[in-house]
Image (spheres, grey):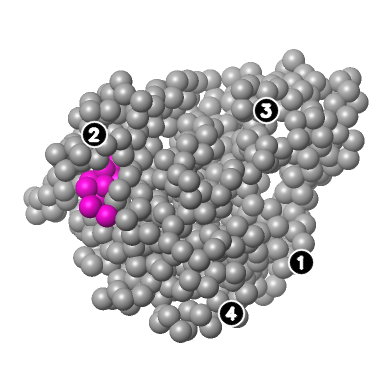
Amino acid sequence: MRRGVWIVAALLTGAACAEGGPAGLPFDCTVEIVETNADYVVERFVYPSPVPPSFPEAKNVIAYCFRPVGLPPGRRPAVLCLHILGGNGSITRAIASSYAARGMTALMPLMPMFLERTPACGRLTDLASPNGPRHLGETFRAVPHDIRRSLDVLAALPDVDSQRIGLIGTSLGGILGVSAATDPRVQKAVFLLAGGDLESILQANNHEVQPIAACVARANASERAVLDEAMRTLEPLRAMPALAEKVKAGRIRMFNAADDEVVPPANTRRLAEALGLAGGRNFTLIPGVGHYTAILKLPDIVDETAEFFGGADLKPRPPRPNRSDDATVKGVFAQLNKLVSGNPQTGRVHRVGVKVDVVRDGAVAFAGFASFLCGPGGRFAVSVDDVGFKGVGAIRLGRGERLWVESAKGTTFCGSAASRANFIDGLDAKARRVHSAAILLTALVAQSGNLALFEKFVKISLQTRGDSRAIVIGDGAFTAEVTLDSTRNVPTGVFYKKGGTEVRVVFTEWNLEAPYRAADFEPRAGAPRREVDAATLDAVISALLGFALEGGFVK
């Protein structure tokens, strides 16, 4: 989209950002505004991949640009944000949106095999297919070129100071970010949950990387040669000489989990030592957390890294919320009630992302990412990724104009007619009772906010631990915690334990009353579709959701 067209689009959407799209690039870049709020606007960029994989969905790079609004004209620092391997992108979106709210432009490019650049059949299905090793090698080969092109786009934005571009990568994004940080345009870089020796990390015994390891093991000689060469290019330990000056100048930082179960601590230490960061102030090893629970420290890390990248150009951090126990609990339960009631205002949606782990008797029964959208008129969309759910790697279903379910092979089954108004109505009686009780309980606490009223039934207390806060709930048979955001009275996680079962839910996104987009509730564009009887589809979705609520997840 050319600059003039972009300006027209901005006027039509009412976006409070008049800086324009990237100009002077030697390739096409289309821009679509997908979200606006008081702090930033989110734009969807599409531009060609320099060395695209052969599956058509990865032909173009798709990137989301978070740009601050309401600031005086001028060029400001910017950050390239590289995402994790699995999930729905919400962790990296949270990082990028936090930077934008503080006054920095943040660009989040999607890598091949991820979200909108995933093969139509799904990532796990494709990796397990005969084409998997070839597609994986092409993906690894494309990544460094896609990152460099994304830096081209970021540097070309008229509100970006091209001399103050930072880079942050999380997990796989952190590993890829090490070699990407050798680009002279990257002035500062932060690697979260990253490590060295990529090949050994991809062979670790965890559900995140097992599909990749299995795919690599099936490669023939020519496919393995492509994979080996691509992994050598991406290997973080090879980037050391080119990063030496940035390390010496204090422009490289690492944050890692002491008990990381995905990137082994030995790999973390090896990268830190190779960089010359081990034992220094720019290497933070967070005690008592693993790869997934480290997200609880994300707000503090985002604050610290925002200062690192932005310095004096940052907007002030939002004020801390009211710390009155009753007022805080009341506010949090009002948020929870709004979510479980599922009644967004007209023209708005509830948008929530989670990382869920269920542990039974010390063994992981379920682990994965999920996102949920609740819209007007019974519209909803559910996406669950990387779970090993009865052998299915991803689940997508929803209701826009009609009900739909996406199969493991990428075919979308669409109901032939309108269906019931609310998917909750399709659940069994027990599940509906649980849902009704959740609405009643959250409403009761939200309306009273008086913790003493509930002591006869259950103990509820607000506990402060430094800058972190949690609502602790228990009755002797179970314990639960609702952890809270450091600047808002909204939940960041729910942790429940009863007997040998532990449920850990970390909110990677919490955005109630977000802007409504009809396309968010429809199947993926371009995927093959089949018409099926609406009543049959109703029954399938009800059974699937009921099974999930009954705890039928298996690793």
Q: Is residue 477 visible?
A: yes
- The quarter of the displayed image where residue 506 is located: top right
**How many neighbours does mark 3 have within 10 angstroms: few (below 14), some (14-19), or many (20 or more)?**
many
Three-letter code, disc 4: Leu
Q: Of circles 3 and 1, which is in front?
A: 3
Residue occupied by mark 4: 11
Q: Main secondary structure of the magenta part?
A: helix
Residue occupied by mark 3: 470
- Is residue 247 on the magenta stretch? no
Q: Nearer the viewer, residue 472 or 377?
A: 472
Quadrant location of the N terminus in the rendered image: bottom left
- Is residue 172 on the magenta stretch? yes
| Mark 2 residue element | helix
Q: CA distance from mark 3 to mark 1?
A: 32 Å
Q: CA distance from mark 4 to mark 2?
A: 46 Å
Three-letter code, disc 1: Thr
Magenta span of residues = 171-185
| Mark 4 residue element | helix
Location of residue 226 in the rendering, given as x and y in whole percent from the top left corner: 13, 53
| Mark 1 residue element | loop
Q: Of circles 3 and 2, which is in front?
A: 2
**Mark before the other along the chain sequence, 3 or 2:** 2
